Every structure is written in C-alpha cells, then in structure tokens.
Amino acid sequence: MFNRFIASILPYFPKKFVWMFSKPYVSGETMDDAIRVSKEFNGHGIKVTLDVLGEFIKTPEEAEANKNEYLELIDKAEKEKIDGNYSVKPTSFGLLIDKEVCYRHIREVVRKAAGYNNFIRIDMEDSPCTDLEIELFRKLREEFPEHVGLVFQSYLRRTLDDIKGLMDLDTQEIPLNYRLCKGIYVEPEEIAFKKYEEVNENFLKDLEYMFANKVYAAIATHDKPLIEGAYELIRKYDVPGNMYEFQMLYGVTPRLRQSIVEDGHVMRIYVPFGKDWFGYSTRRLKENPKMASHIMKAIFYKG
C-alpha cells in the first residue's frame, strides 16, 4: 500500500524533487549528455544502446519530431564513433495512432542505421502493443535482416510461442537477434506470470530455446540468479562470444555489471535521454510501484 501511495502522488511533486531519484538512471536531457555518457562507457570497454525518451505520444507531429531526433542522433553518434546501437519504442512513432505511419517512420530510422552498418532494437511495450510490434519487426526484418532486432518479455505467458512463431525468419547467415528481459508493465494474471520464481523460470526457458536454436541473445537482467543461470546455459550450449551479450539499465547494479565485464562477457548499457525524463520516470514508477521503497531509501540514504 505504501509503495502504491508513493507511486500515485510522486507525479504531482515538483520536477526538481523527482529528478533526485531520476538522475542516476537517465543520462540527461540532451543528445550531448547521452554522447558524453556513452563515451565514458566505451572507455571502459562497455557498449551502449541509445534511447530517446517519449513513448505513448498523442499527435502525429510528435511522431515526426521523434523520427527526426533519431535521425539526428544516429548521424551524431556515428560521427563521434560511439560503440553502440539504438533502441526505439514504437509508441513514440505513433504505433497506437496509425501503425502504417509508425512503420514508415521506423523504417526510415532503420534505413539510416543500416547506412552506417548499425542496428535498431524495437522495444516491446505493454500487451496491447505486442502483436503490432511483432508485425512491425517481421516487416522490417524481411527488408533489413542484419539491422533490426526485437525485445521479448519473459513474464508474458505467450513469449516462448512468439519466439517460436518467428523462426521462419531465421537464416543461417543472419541469425535472429532478440533482447530478453523480464518485463515491467502491469498485466493481468491470465496473460502474465506474477510470481518471481515463475518469471525467472520462464526467462531461462526462453533463453535456452534461443541458444538451442542459435538466436543471438541480448540477456537483459540485473538479477544475479538469472545471470548465473545464463552462464550455465552458455556453457551447456557452448555459445560463442559473438552470439550473446548482457544488457543492463543505466545506473543499475554497477558492481554486478563490472563483474560480468571482468569475466570477459560483452556488456551493453541502455542509455536513455530526453526532455521527457519526467514522464519516463513517473510512468516507470506507476508500472512498478515496488520501486517506491528503493527510491525513498535512495533519497535519504546516499548510495
């Protein structure tokens, strides 16, 4: 109850207050902030994936603006020789307004990245978007097989079937490329696992299927038992180092992150930035009220 109460009232607090807990997890408001942070990670041998904040937009004009910002970001990051790729949320390109317009916007972004021989990751959002985002990925994969990937969420009961359902797109020359995460959105029990053990068990089942079928796996978790489980599967299937990576959010579990890097595994950090940091932060809190207790500790107990 406490967590839900804090989550419900925090969006009404002054932005300066909310920034107190947001700033460790958002690289900043500007593209230059994201580039600076990315260079710091690159300097420590860590790759990045850049994300412009601003999902669930309301107007076509916002979708157009987001597309243009990504096109500018790609040019700038490539000029600065950032070792990283890009993540996009389809709702920020108008998925729930006009899916064809969204497709054209994201296709333009993928084409821009492909021109630099780089890569776009299509994020998975809440369950009303799942089928639309799989359809979007399917269309883009057929045209840009080397330059586009998708995200799957292990807390959805359907995920393993969805992964299997896309295997017709797989080729020996160009493996499918998925990020696997737990998922953060609040979903009904009939479509999503709720218990920690169930979500983790499903995560490792999904990951094992990916390894067994030679799908490139971006293992996105901060959960030590899942990381250890991933290590076991990597050994079991003798997965080469160029067929997987670990991914973490900016600002989360830096010690665990460093231990993975020191063990010789590829690490990529999700680096979000943008003027919509307030909306991003408060939405994440509403979607996962359990974060509230961690936020209060972070405010009153530094570190």
Image (cartoon, grey):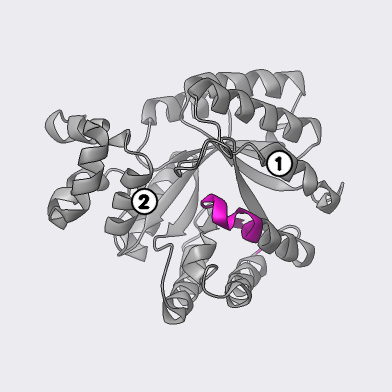
Q: In the image, is residue 135 above or below residue 247?
A: below
Q: Disc number at residue 216?
A: 1
Residue 152: say if magenta: no
Whole-percent x, y for residue 32 in the image: 34, 63
Pinpoint residue 37: horizontal percent, then vertical percent.
36, 51
Q: Is residue 22 above or below residue 192?
A: below
Highlighted magenta segment, given as a residue range: 117-133
Q: Residue at x 31, y 44 (%)?
A: 285
Q: Which residue is mark 2?
A: 37
Which numbered disc flags the more N-terminal residue, 2 or 1? Answer: 2
Kind of residue indicated by mark 2? Val
Decide which of 27, 76 is in the foreground and name it.
Answer: 27
Q: What element does badge 2 sit on?
A: helix
Image coords of residue 28 (percent x, y): 29, 56
Q: Is residue 86 visible?
A: yes
Give residue 5's quadrant in the image: top left
**Residue 118 visible (yes or no):** no
State the residue at coordinates (43%, 64%): 56
The quadrant in which residue 1 appears is top left
Q: Nearer the viewer, residue 200 or 51?
A: 200
* Element class at badge 1: strand
Q: Is residue 262 above or below residue 267?
A: above
Disc 1 crowd rating (10 Å Cα; few below 14, some 14-19, many 20+) is many
Q: Amino acid at mark 1?
A: Tyr
Q: Is residue 121 magenta?
A: yes
Q: Image check: 114 left or right of 283?
A: right
Disc 2 versus disc 1: distance between alpha carbons?
26 Å
Horizontally, is 108 left or right of 30 in the view? right
Question: Quick check: 199 left or right of 8?
Answer: right
User: Which disc is residue 245 wearing?
Assistant: none
The C terminus, quarter of image: top left
Query: Which of 296/185 is in front?
Result: 185
